[in-house]
Amino acid sequence: MQEWANQLCENRQFGSKMTDSKYFTTTKKGEIFELKAELNSDKKEKKKEAVKKVIASMTVGKDVSALFPDVVNCMQTDNLELKKLVYLYLMNYAKSQPDMAIMAVNTFVKDCEDPNPLIRALAVRTMGCIRVDKITEYLCEPLRKCLKDEDPYVRKTAAVCVAKLHDINAQLVEDQGFLDTLKDLISDSNPMVVANAVAALSEIAESHPNSNLLDLNPQSINKLLTALNECTEWGQIFILDCLANYTPRDDRESQSICERVTPRLSHANSAVVLSAVKVLMKFMEMLPKDLDYYGTLLKKLAPPLVTLLSAEPELQYVALRNINLIVQKRPEILKHEMKVFFVKYNDPIYVKLEKLDIMIRLASQANIAQVLAELKEYATEVDVDFVRKAVRAIGRCAIKVEQSAERCVSTLLDLIQTKVNYVVQEAIVVIKDIFRKYPNKYESVIATLCENLDSLDEPEARAAMIWIVGEYAERIDNADELLESFLEGFHDESTQVQLQLLTAIVKLFLKKPTETQELVQQVLSLATQDSDNPDLRDRGYIYWRLLSTDPVAAKEVVLAEKPLISEETDLIEPTLLEELICHIGTLASVYHKPPSAFVEGSRGVVHKRLPARTGSGESAESPDPGSAAGVSEPPPAVIPSQGDLLGDLLNLDLAPSVTTTTGPPPPASGMQLGSMDLLGGGLDSLLSGDIGGSAAMGAGFGAPPAVMPASLNAPVAGGFGDLFDLGGGVGMPIGNYVPPKTVWLPAMKAKGLEISGTFARRAGVIQMEMTFTNKAMSVMTDFAVQFNRNSFGMAPAGPLQVLTPLSPNQTIEVSLPLNTVGPVMKMEPLNNLQVAVKNNIDVFYFSAQYPISMLFVEDGKMERQVFLATWKDIPNDNESQFHIKDCHLNSDAASNKLQGSNVFTIAKRTVDGQDMLYQSMKLSNGIWVLAELKVQAGNPNYTVSLKCRAPEVSQCVFQSYEAALKN
Amino acid sequence: MIHSLFLINHSGDIFLEKHWKSVISRSVCDYFFEAKEKAVEPENVPPVLQTPHHYLISIYRDKLFFLAVIQTEVPPLFVIEFLHRLAEMFQDYFGECSEVIIKDNVVVVYELLEEMLDNGFPLATESNVLKEMIRPPNILRTVVNTLTGSSHVGETLPTGTLSTVPWRRAGVKYTNNEAYFDVVEEIDAILDKSGTTVFAEIQGAIEACVKLTGMPDLTLSFMNPRLLDDVSFHPCVRYKRWESERVLSFVPPDGNFTLMTYHVSAQNLVAIPVYVKQSINFFDSGSCGRLDITVGPKQTMGKPVEGLMITIHMPKAVLSANLTATQGNYNYDSSTKVLVWDIGKLNPQKLPNLKGSLSLQAGAPKPEENPSLNINLKIQQLAISGLKVNRLDMYGEKYKPFKGVKYVTKAGKFQVRT
């Protein structure tokens, strides 16, 4: 060892005279001329030295193309080194000198017949690299021979050459039948040839996504598995990636493939390991969970993943991005390995951030103490980005692990005490999120937060603090002063802060109307008159209107109970996750986006999905793997549902990092009240409102200020109407009543395709009625539709009937019959439906909410006895009560109306002038819902009690009730 | 597959480019330079970058960036593994991997690149195969070549390219047949302020140097193979034998190679050889701080601890250090803010101590962060996991080789938080 090293050292000293660096020294004028002379020298050695000089100049980017004929002249030689050097040169310059390059063809063709396989291979390899059409024509015959060469080294080189040729001229490769020859090579006796053939075919297949180049069947799979054991590490990667595209016929085949792939987990090459993990993660999906082997396999996956983390940082990074996916799909694999994700101070920042993310995903009650101790440690690190993320992580832990919330809050308070500016700001942002998750629990810390008010200079932190002050205004004695202090520099604040300040002050006013009247007027006029920002103005006007017309409604809207935020918001959407699991180890897995989202020219990329378990009773799995279109990204909810509107109004999703899941839309009664007497006299209602305002206070309001142009008045009010119409539009259509279509997919988001639609139940069949409009410049064809799994297994009962191409500006009506026998997955909200529509341009995603009454079946009338027994049988905990306001129907009319929606009245009882209707309905999946509707003559407020064994549907059923009665 | 390669030095100059398909303009590297600028430290450049038409996958090694350009969906780990392999190959061929040596041998480098990838597909990446095709520069041969004009490129097809044991060349001959195995274990650990282990694991490797004639078939067995549940093997190891018998059976490559790496994570098995008592404080006023560090032996299994060295990355505000070491030397580099205390052998009777004052930039606020300590050490003749080789047998050849096994334990990423 030592000796060898010494030798090398000497070699280096010697090298200053003798190495290739001497080729760089000639920079004089006439250099090319000199080289030319040397190239044409008779002396072999001089020739070679000259070619080396040429190559050296070439590598550093000097243009030596002028020497082309002279260099090509040196090609005819039996000196292999000289030949290789000339080939290197040719590959570089042939493109720019195609006519000259032809001169080389003869030598290539001759070399392809050489007895030495090394030379045959070299010739065919080089020819493939010369991207000149005239040369490729001559390449075909030698290539055909080389693909059948007796020497495997030549065959494996030729296999790659087919891929090269395909890159230059795909048509030629197909015409010449090279693809078939390449497919035959998958059955070659030499594993290296097999591996290269697979690699070449995979690369070709990428530009032909729909071609069936890698047609895998059990026989070819067997060949690949045999070659897998014997080929090089790189070949193993290609073979494993190819295997991952196969869908085994049954769990037995799946298991046998897994067994043969598992040894690859112990390979020293991390790319082999990760490709093997991909195959296993995909195929284990098919194994029955109670199988012993399933458990064994799960255990085998952890160690290799952990080992990847001791590799070089770049490898760690890719591994961590993939582990992030694996942890979401199968948390059990790494649940005991938390510690390997602990951050070392000299990890590169990109590794630190990824580790942190995984730590939070693995955090559980069992290990939360450790995690928090670590996070607190990280919060004192040097790197600002990392520190911020660590502080945020503490907040996420609090939201994820309820038991730890208290400890997280106290940790955050400790951090605030450090007074490090960015730590304090970040801590305040996350504490706001904690308040959102656990309202009325940790408000004792508000005092501490208020102490740090002055140090906040980042918009997000300021906005969070303002939100806190507004939300808990009643408990902060000097809330008005605090908010007022923010108001001073109102116009210098960012929009985020301005909006928040506006809302907070309105909240404060509604809570403490007596002292804050001046403040609220000030902010309203700042927002509406002095601001150029339309969002801010709109919100200002909305509040103004609300306050001036109906403060009760204002209170109900502004101070409405907010849905809790949940920890799952940062998880990858399940269908996307499934697709990404199929892409473990690829760029898609690094970006956490489906390949279709970023791979250039991959319009037709086939969405991959995990295979379905073959065992019975797993109806939750997709019925047809492979072809199904995965829904990518959290699909944009294009319809503004009531929840969204309200949410937006109240700025619920204040922190972009923790997005709010829109829960079941809160009852909009308050809002509708508001809309009804929107144009009525505002002043009186303010005075009579139960907020206890004095007459003097109300006087400040009234109509919008005089400076506001009168013309504005109407549009604003009109805008309001629209807003509420929209809210009503999403309301529930019943029976024959089909609400107007709403836009589900705006043209902007779908490359010109606009889809609007609605749901209807006609003669017992659910119809999805859609209008397709082509707003693009080109014709659209090949429409198809697919649903994501949903709560009630809704699925298209037939293909989408768009038979004629849709020309630009054309609109067609399509009615898609649905059944309810599709795969089931619980959605949030329950009646959410995620839809993918494909055409010749792309795949688009949207989501729509269907009224649950669509699912009420026609035979939903229960026998009286059964009803009575069932009502008693269902525990009282499952009963929920709702109020329906402003319904002016009598009980019979109501009963009739509801019957149209398959809500059947079984019995009616009258007690003390109050009608009690007993009703039943049955959902398509067999769930019975029993209802008791109380209607009092002359009272527009109904009470409905719902009892169901699956109480989570009650909210949706109630919405249907409300919609049915009001339409 | 891999489309192009750019080698970029520390200061951001592209000094070598190689295209395996069509030529991609150097300007594609601008996206990389942008990221490099943003990352400040070269270690922090993200390894996978997206540009409008290409993906850039890079590694930072030996103060050089190896940047691969790809155009289609290619497994990034494959690219990163390949780039590291490339760096190792330069190291192997030229004894070091640096801009100077690569420029000095640019033609050999070019030939190597051409031989290692074909159209972006790996062709020959085994060092013994490559060395048969392209001989490494060697003083004697350079002289001979100049005299006789013979080439350094092999004329025949290397045997390894197609055999089922591509890692071994045929016709190996030695007069002294020897096989040495080094069991090297590194302790990765994080200790907290109080000295409690937050995290500890052992990264082990068996480094082999095998110089045996012919086609020997070796079997290596352990006293306690059950320690090993997480292993990665050199491709030569027969996995089936390991699964069934827990022995390593293999036809070795010729020369130096890593036979296996393993990973012991069970914390109770990880002994922590030293303890550190430290206090580093900065004062609110006076722009100064104090430092006091003592190191002592903990679980050393009776073996001496050598090569002990402590490295501390000080906060930016620390200008200089005025310290006294009872043993060894210390050095504070005020430009990189790194304090290195080279202790040497640990004397359990008289524990080494380093203490004194730190002076801070005048007027700078008191540093917020706590500097972590990085510890280096070495213990000869000990594998800290307790792994022991039982025996080594050779089949397939008649001679009697000379065999040897050595053990050594080092500190890997061994950090003490303050």
Image (cartoon, rainbow, N blue to C red):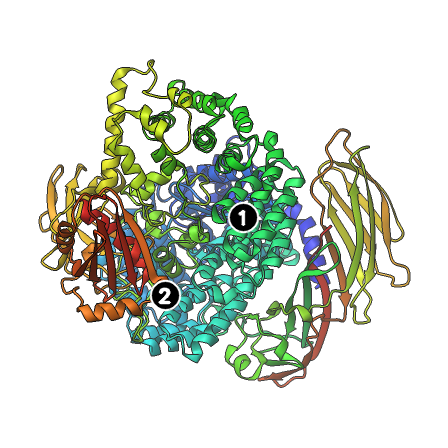
The local secondary structure at tag 1 comes to loop
- Which residue does the image show at 53% across and 65% down from the upper left? A335
Q: Which mark is residue B88?
A: none
Foreground mark, 2 or 1, reads 1
Left or right: where does residue B161 sit relative to residue A243?
A: right
Q: Quadrant of residue B378?
A: bottom right
Task: Work out how far the residue at label 2 is from the one at label 1, CA to CA, in angstroms.
Answer: 49 Å
Q: Amino acid at mark 2?
A: Ala
Number of numbered callouts drawn: 2
Same chain? Circles 2 and 1 = yes
- Residue A366 in the image: x percent, y percent? 57, 63
Please tell me whether residue A187 is drawn above or below residue B130 in the rendered image: below
Looking at the image, which residue sits at the far front? A912
Left or right: where does residue A601 sit relative to residue A327?
A: left
Q: Amino acid at mark 1?
A: Lys
Left or right: where does residue A867 sit relative to residue A665?
A: left
The local secondary structure at tag 2 comes to loop
Mark 1 belongs to chain: A
Residue A826 in view (yes/no): no
- Residue A23 in the image: x percent, y percent? 56, 42
In the rendered image, the quadrant that contains the N terminus of chain B is: bottom left
Please tell me whether residue A133 is drawn above or below residue A499 in the rendered image: below
Depth check, front residue: A450 or B136? A450
User: Residue tagged by mark 1?
Assistant: A441
Q: Which mark is residue A244?
A: 2
